[in-house]
């Protein structure tokens, strides 16, 4: 260690970083550096000190000339391999165009980006019909895979645009372009756009394998259950309860208030006016949850399922955006924005009055954010998002068409229910705190299970707190009151600069001239006095 720890400033250490392929440390560079340092040693002196411990003194000089093969390179190596994209060549474009040419599709070289290996095709117009009352423009975009020994997968995207600016997409990944085109053809174009209460809604999907979705859905829980004692015990308890009282548990769950709106067959409760408006809407394309397994996309590698990832809609001056994560099963995120120079004046329970699964809105700088609790696994997740999105758009269109004062009149009972729902975490915490002193009055045996659970209640509660899909918010909810503002969207007044005083330069020159005259008159008056 003493031999290798000297002259570190003159000979920097090589970067012992894992390589991209093997993942092992570059030991050869370390050995070469040790050889260089040993070659510089001239004299080694060993001296015994007064304490009886040996003192070693190493005298080194300039390094000798060594072969270049032994000198390591000290350039930093990247942790990940850098993949350089090769631009699309003319021959590659001709090879990729074959399945598209058979379908009558032509490339749009002006919109394509050959350096990014992106090939765009000319859009085609889709006229309006009963399902969608607005014309649409359909365009394909191919993101070609990098060629080589191990070619990757192509990505084919179908973009559908409306005249209002809304855009939706369907993404398919694979190596065979003919199969990708067949997969996209099995997804109706009308499914990417839906109409709710006269509002056009754009929905984007990703085609994923059913086997991968099932593996992902049971992956985390299955791994946790098979590798832990608590997981195996919980699986046994669930299986036994399912065999004995499975029907009772299902009926009990359906009666819960937060379970009523999450059933696949549950229809949203609409008023007489909303029901009449829904009856006049065009028939919607059946979703995956409504039609079951009929809308699965059959391929050679197995069936595929369209998974919703994002939606957007414009309700008057309010723009609604929804994002749904595919991998973690978290609630869908909502975002309400408006045009620049305007500000949304919304109550926090604007969407929470729809149902138990809708969370209150939170204002973040210039937009409002909310969440919708949906099923964590497919295919129920996509079906619930599509259904809850329709209810949200219908509710927004109905509410924003009326003045804000009508909101409290129409949803007074639902607003009190939202206040109770927001106060539940705090009420539960206060209830546990109030019941804690009464534990000492309980007469429990030393070997009772209830005493064991009470003793370990704090760590169990802390563990369950972090295992929740969404963190509870401890707050004192505001009481529902009538809204006092007149409009939902208010124009932000621009800050005006204070008016500059007129003739600033002339006034300042007059003050300087008067001061100069006063300075001349003062000595004259003193002389006369």
Image: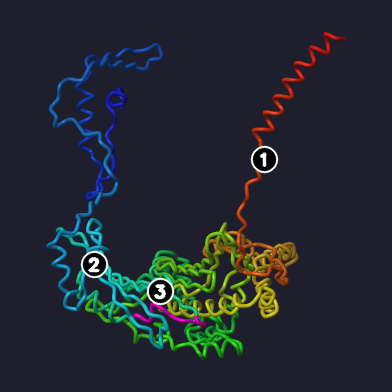
Relative image position of residue 455 (x, y in whole percent): 63, 61
Regarding residue 212, the answer to whether it shows in the image is: no
Query: Which residue has dot 1 on it?
Result: 502
Q: Which residues are magenta?
A: 189-198
Q: Are marks 3 and 1 in contact (CB under 8 Å)?
A: no
Comparing labels 3 and 1, the label whose residue is closer to the camera: 1
With respect to residue 218, does 255 lie above or below?
Answer: below
In this picture, is 202 found above or below 456?
below
Badge 2 or badge 1: first in the primary sequence: 2
Say which of 266 and 182 sits in front. 182
Where is residue 368 drawn, in percent x and y? 56, 64
- Separation of residues labelled 2 and 1 (CA atoms): 60 Å
User: What residue is shown at x 56% (from left), y 90% (from top)?
Assistant: 276
Residue under pointer 2: 108
Q: Is residue 263 left or right of residue 43?
A: right
Q: Nearer the viewer, residue 96 or 210?
A: 96
| Residue 503 falls within the magenta-colored stretch | no
Disc 2 element: loop
- Horizontal side of 521 relative to 28 (left or right) equals right
Decide which of tag 3 and tag 1 comes sooner along the chain.
3
């Amino acid at each position: 260690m003493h031999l290798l720890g000297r002259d570190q400033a003159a000979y920097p250490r090589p970067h012992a970083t894992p390589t991209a392929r093997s993942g092992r440390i570059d030991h050869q560079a370390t050995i070469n550096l040790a050889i260089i340092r040993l070659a510089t040693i001239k004299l080694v002196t060993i001296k015994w000190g007064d304490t009886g411990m040996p003192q070693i003194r190493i005298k080194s000089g300039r390094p000798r000339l060594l072969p270049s093969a032994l000198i390591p390179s000290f350039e930093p190596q990247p942790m990940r391999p850098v993949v350089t994209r090769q631009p699309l060549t003319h021959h590659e474009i001709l090879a990729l165009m074959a399945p598209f040419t058979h379908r009558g599709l032509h490339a749009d070289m002006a919109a394509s980006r050959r350096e990014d290996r992106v090939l765009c095709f000319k859009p085609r117009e889709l006229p309006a019909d009963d399902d969608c009352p607005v014309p649409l423009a359909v365009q394909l975009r191919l993101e070609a895979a990098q060629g080589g020994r191990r070619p990757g997968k192509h990505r084919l995207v179908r973009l559908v645009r409306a005249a209002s600016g809304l855009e939706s997409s369907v993404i398919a990944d694979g190596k065979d372009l003919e199969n990708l085109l067949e997969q996209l053809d099995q997804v109706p174009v009308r499914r990417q756009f839906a109409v709710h209460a006269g509002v056009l809604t754009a929905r984007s999907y990703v085609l994923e394998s059913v086997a991968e979705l099932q593996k992902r859905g049971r992956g985390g829980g299955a791994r946790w259950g098979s590798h832990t004692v608590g997981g195996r015990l919980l699986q046994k308890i669930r299986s036994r309860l399912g065999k004995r009282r499975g029907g009772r548990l299902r009926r009990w769950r359906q009666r819960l208030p937060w379970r009523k709106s999450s059933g696949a067959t549950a229809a949203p409760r609409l008023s007489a006016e909303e029901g009449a408006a829904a009856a006049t809407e065009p028939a919607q394309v059946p979703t995956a949850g409504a039609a079951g397994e009929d809308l699965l996309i059959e391929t050679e590698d197995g069936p595929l399922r369209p998974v919703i990832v994002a939606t957007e809609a414009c309700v008057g001056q309010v723009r609604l955006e929804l994002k749904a994560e595919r991998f973690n099963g978290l609630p869908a995120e909502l975002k309400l924005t408006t045009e620049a120079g305007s500000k949304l004046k919304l109550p926090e329970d604007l969407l929470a009055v729809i149902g138990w699964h809708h969370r209150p809105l939170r204002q973040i700088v210039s937009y409002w954010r909310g969440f919708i609790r949906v099923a964590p696994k497919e295919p129920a997740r996509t079906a619930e998002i599509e259904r809850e999105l329709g209810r949200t758009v219908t509710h927004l269109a109905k509410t924003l068409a009326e003045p804000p004062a009508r909101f409290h009149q129409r949803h007074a009972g639902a607003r009190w229910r939202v206040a109770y729902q927001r106060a539940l975490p705090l009420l539960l915490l206060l209830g546990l705190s109030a019941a804690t002193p009464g534990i000492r009055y309980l007469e429990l045996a030393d070997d009772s299970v209830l005493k064991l659970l009470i003793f370990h209640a704090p760590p169990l509660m802390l563990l369950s707190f972090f295992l929740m899909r969404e963190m509870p918010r401890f707050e004192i909810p505001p009481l529902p009151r009538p809204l006092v503002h007149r409009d939902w969207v208010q124009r932000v007044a621009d800050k005006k600069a204070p008016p500059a005083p007129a003739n600033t330069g002339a006034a300042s020159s007059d003050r300087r001239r008067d001061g100069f005259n006063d300075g001349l008159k003062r000595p004259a008056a003193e002389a006369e006095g």
